[in-house]
Amino acid sequence: MGRKLAKVLLAAGLTAVFFYFFARSVEWRKVPGYIADADLPLFLVLIPAAAVHFFTRALRWGFLLAPERKGLRYRNLVAANIIGFTVNAIFPGRVGELAKPLYLARKEGLRTGFLVGTVVVERMFDMFTMCLFLGLFFLARPLFHRAHPIEPAAYDRLTSWGVLGVVLAAALLLLMLSLHFFRGRVVSLAGRLLKPFPAGFRDRAIGLLDEFSDGLKSFRSPGVLAGYTLLSFVVWVGVILFYWLLFAAYRVPAPFYLVVPYVFLAAVGASIPTPGMVGGFHYFSKVGMTSLLMVGADLAAGMTLVAHAVQIGVTCALGYAILSSEGLTLFQLRKMGEKDKR
């Protein structure tokens, strides 16, 4: 009970801190007017665009699972992704990352540990892909910097985040390759390094490594790895498209390539384990809009609220529809996820 309360308090504290920094310097009386001043046809396109990533993620996940079992039902892969994001939208602690594989294991009879490992691989590749996109942006930036200038201070901060992201992505790639080729040695080394820590923490960490390694079994050939990497690009191009449409709906002149660093920052904020991305996503989204795209703070706040509301609304509507059709509840999935997490 004490641990659960500590997690809730931590999530609430993070939410409050980031939302405070998001809300300051905004004249809130102006925000409703900015929100309402949208191009209606483009705004309506945002609603289906918010769901595109569920289908591309399902395609990518199915590609990763194919070596384990062919013929998985695509609708179950889509539903599992929607349910995972729905649980994350309601509850703190990223429990949806466990609800997603548990749901698919229940529907398709696959091994839960293997599925959890593939979800960990997905998140690693998400980070790796966005870092690669950001690297390509930096390479291409000299070609466009006069047409779309960025504040030097903002560019320096983005560069710092990018360097950190590249270092993390390289470390994760090294970990993935090491686990793939030297699983026994890496797990043994991890056990020795984690000896000073409590047994429960050590067992969970080693268990996570095992699950991660299990998920890597799908990469049995360079072709599979290349195909999965390509599908990761497809996933994130779809995400970038959603935000590009958002900027177009609010008449912000943002070329597609300039949305890339904004999405990188928004993804950093969304990765903070608060319920429904509240706080972290809002702050980093506003920072990206004001410093990279020169959007005013009031409009940036309004657009961020709209982007968040559309994504959460579409996700939860689809998630509840799937759950109600199967007689399940979010609380049942959360309990399943917490039980597996222990």
Image: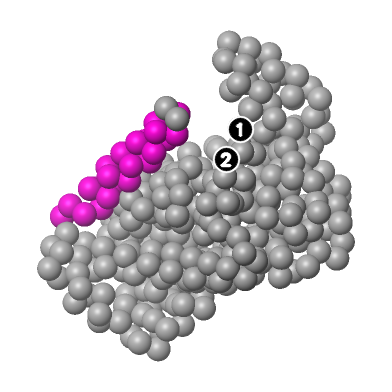
- Which picture quadrant has residue 272? top left
Using the rendered image of the protein, determine whether residue 270 is visible from the camera's viewpoint. Answer: no
Residue 339: in magenta span: no
Front residue of this view, candidates 314 and 329: 329
- Which picture quadrant has residue 212? top right
Lateral position of residue 204 relative to residue 156, left or right: right
Front residue of this view, candidates 40 and 136: 40
- Judge the density around disc 1: few (<14), some (14-19), many (≥20) Cα neighbours within 10 Å: few
Disc 2 marks which amino acid? Glu
Q: How many marks?
A: 2
Lateral position of residue 160 relative to residue 207, left or right: left
Q: Main secondary structure of the magenta part?
A: helix
Looking at the image, which residue is at 40% across and 89% down?
41
In the rendered image, which quarter contains the N terminus? Answer: top left
Q: Real-space Cα distance between discs 1 and 2? A: 6 Å
Q: Secondary structure at mark 2?
A: helix
Front residue of this view, candidates 160 and 277: 277
Q: Position of residue 11 (x, y in %)?
A: 38, 41
Looking at the image, which residue is at 12% across and 68% down?
29
**Residue at numbered disc 2:** 338
Q: Position of residue 263 (x, y in %)?
A: 45, 59
Q: Is residue 306 above or below residue 161?
A: below
Looking at the image, which residue is at 74% across and 25% down?
186
Q: What label does residue 342 carry, if any? A: 1
The stretch in magenta equals 3-25
Front residue of this view, candidates 95 and 157: 95
Colour convention = one colour
Q: Position of residue 132 (x, y in %)?
A: 58, 52
The reply to whether callout 1 and callout 2 are in contact (CB within 8 Å) is yes
Looking at the image, which residue is at 60% across and 60% down?
328
Disc 1 marks which amino acid? Arg
Q: Secondary structure at mark 1?
A: loop
